[in-house]
Amino acid sequence: MELYLNATSPYARVARIVALERGLTDDVSLRWCDPWVDDEALLAVNPASRVPALVTDEGTTLSESLLIAQYLNARGNGIDLLPGAALAEVLSHTGFGQGLIDAAFTTVIARKHQGAAADESVLGQRRERAIARLLATLEGHERTRKGEPEPLTLGDIVVGVALDYLSFRLPEVDWPSRHQQLAAWHRALLGRESFRETAFA
Ligand SMILES: N[C@@H](CCC(=O)N[C@@H](CS)C(=O)NCC(=O)O)C(=O)O
């Protein structure tokens, strides 16, 4: 399999962590690319010009991080990241994490293209409120209150990447000092090899 990615994409990092946690390191070749230019190799597999994109051994392209995560989870031998017994809870947690990634990522891209005024726009203000609400929800979330992200699920991965992305790109949000239970939970997650190996740079 080939995974198209770049080093700063939170979506691509989710796919990469899932591959690592499923023990698929040797089965997935990393194809580093820049989705923001017309990268010929990426365009040839994903007309949306977005990462992550996974090309299976049969030559089928999968796009969308959570669909790729689902596919990789069905392969390999690691922990089942989507355990059937708690599927609704795990998908719910995953959705909050993806919502946080979407709001943070869109804020970063809007600033890049429209400048600081993007934050003052109606949509910018909505994103800021969504980030605040999602953080408050995750702080009080049952999974956070459990303390340790064990056994690991897809929800833990997506929420963990979302929080790390906030620290990386929007440090002024300063979520760890406002949400200390969540910060402690996140620290435990960052100790995992899969998170260390894929740290944002
Ligand atoms: N919903 C998609 C979002 C993927 C996405 O937006 N990736 C960004 C990089 S972080 C990208 O490739 N952007 C290039 C573009 O939109 O042209 C997913 O979950 O995979």
Image: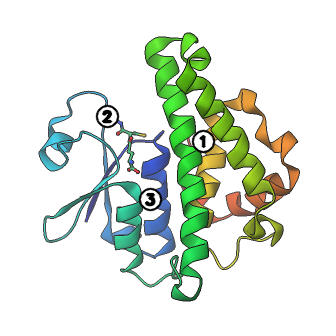
The residues bearing labels 1 and 2 have C-alpha atoms spaced at a distance of 18 Å
Say above or below: 43 vs 95.
above
Which residue is labeled 3 in the image? 16
User: Element type at marker 2?
Assistant: loop
Mark 1 packing: few (<14 Cα in 10 Å), some, or many (20+)? many
User: Element type at marker 3?
Assistant: helix
Identify which amino acid the numbered label 3 is placed on.
Arg
Say above or below: 90 vs 66.
below
Mark 2 packing: few (<14 Cα in 10 Å), some, or many (20+)? some
Q: Are marks 1 and 2 in contact (CB under 8 Å)?
A: no
What residue is shown at x 56% (from left), y 21% (from top)?
122
Residue 87, horizontal then vertical, whole percent: 54, 79
Which residue is labeled 1 in the image? 165
Do we see residue 86 in this rendering?
yes
Q: Quadrant of ligand 1?
A: top left
What residue is shown at x 55% (from left), y 38% (from top)?
103
Residue 8, horizontal then vertical, whole percent: 48, 39
Identify which amino acid the numbered label 1 is placed on.
Tyr
Residue 131, horizontal then vertical, whole percent: 66, 40
Identify which amino acid the numbered label 2 is placed on.
Asp
Residue 29 in which image quadrant = bottom left
Total marks drawn?
A: 3
The residues bearing labels 3 and 2 have C-alpha atoms spaced at a distance of 16 Å
Q: Which mark is residue 188?
A: none
Residue 95, horizontal then vertical, whole percent: 54, 59
What residue is shown at x 58% (from left), y 66% (from top)?
92
Q: Are marks 3 and 2 in contact (CB under 8 Å)?
A: no
State which quarter of the image contains the N terminus.
bottom left
Choose between 153 and 103: the one closer to the eye.
103
Which residue is labeled 2 in the image? 34
Q: Sequence-wise, which precedes: disc 1 or disc 2? A: 2
Q: Nearer the viewer, mark 3 or mark 1?
A: 1
